[in-house]
Amino acid sequence: MIRLIAVLIVLTPALSNVDEQSEILLQAKRALFETISEESSEEMVKIARYLGSPDSEIDSLVTSSLKALSDCIITEVHAQALKQGLPVDIVLPAFAGGTVDNDVMDVLLQLDNEAINVRTERCDGMMMAGIEKASSAEQVTVGSSPGGIELADTGITFTPPEGFERLPKNLIDLKWPGKNAPRYVVANAGATTTVAFDVKNKDLSVMNMEDLRVSFEQMFNVAIPGIQWKQNKVVSHDGKKWILLEMTSSAIDTDIHNIMFITSFQKRMVIFNFNSTKQDFPLYEEVLRASMESIRFPSAD
């Protein structure tokens, strides 16, 4: 197995300017991804091929896996650095390729390397486990219906934005580590803009959609720091009532623009989540909304 990072991975706390901190973290993710790719791409291709990944998917699988790995590592190291109270504006530029002078080295030496190793070990393990499962995991069928994608065996279809491809299960596990992760995701090349969709075994048919919308609103107001509502209402689409929740939120590494679309189908919950970084959203807004409008149900449910 590959031990990709030894421990001079450093990121950290609170700059007063959130945008500045986000940019520094983004630069660090890019720098780490470039380093990992240069050192490990050939070996990862061999492993993916040995594990039976289709040749047509190996390059994209390796690229997306290594990007997810670098993002995961940075997220974990950032959390540890925050815990220790180390200054991101000193440490992170050094990690991103800047000069490491004596003052910077003094800060780096304060990092708890053992804790960082524990945090980042899961990233390597999750990536490799995901590659092992990629060929056999349940996947969406892309391009097999007039709507572009059919959601499992429901007959529900929609057309994803052009160029979006399925996200391997290992990346889904990294981006949504909780037990409620979506089973199906398509994404742009860098996985910075995604469309997640699923059918959950929760009967919404017995619930009032307006009451349910209020419940979602209250839950998100508590759970999501810095939430700002763009839309929050019940709408009609393709003959059904949908809950439309559009919001932005602030995070340590990037700001997010989220559009959730929720309805009932055959005593189950259908949920779509159109998710993009703040930087990406203006580039993808039109195609994301068109994708949402393309959702269609079978003629009888």
Image (tube, grey):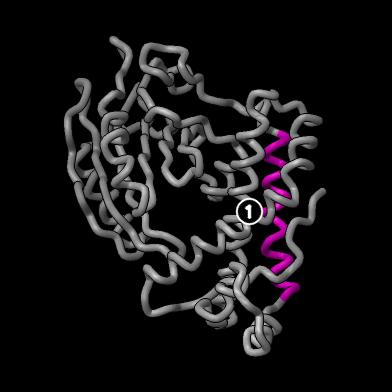
Residue 265 place in picture, x, y as percent:
33, 24
Q: Residue at x 31, y 29 (%)?
A: 291
Residue drawn at (20%, 47%) of the image: 232
Q: Quadrant of the C terminus?
A: top left
Q: Quadrant of residue 57?
A: top right
> Residue at horizontal 47%, vertical 33%?
186
Q: Is residue 68 above or below residue 296?
A: below
Residue 165 visible in the snapshot? yes
- Nearest to the observer: residue 31 or residue 254: 31
Q: Is 127 part of what is drawn in magenta?
A: yes
Asked if residue 201 can be seen in this view, the reply is no
| Residue assigned mark 1 | 34
* Of the pair 278 and 294, the residue shown nearer to us: 278
Q: Is residue 3 above or below residue 90?
A: above
Q: What secondary structure predominates along the stretch shown in magenta?
A: helix
**In the picture provided, is 213 more to the left or to the right than 188?**
left
Q: With 273 as the anchor, is 181 left or right in this view?
A: right
| 52 shown above or below 116 | above
Q: Quadrant of residue 95?
A: bottom right
Location of residue 228 in the rendering, given as x and y in whole percent from the top left corner: 25, 59
**Badge 1 element:** helix
Q: Which residues, given as a range, are shown in magenta?
A: 113-132
Q: Nearer the viewer, residue 109 or 23?
A: 23
Q: Which residue is found at the position 71% from the left and 41% from the top?
A: 129
What amino acid is at disc 1? Answer: Glu
Position of residue 92 measured from the top left corner of the image (x, y, whole percent): 56, 73
How packed mark 1 is, by other alpha carbons closer than 10 Å (few <14, some 14-19, many 20 or more), is some
Percent x, y of residue 282? 29, 46
Number of numbered discs: 1
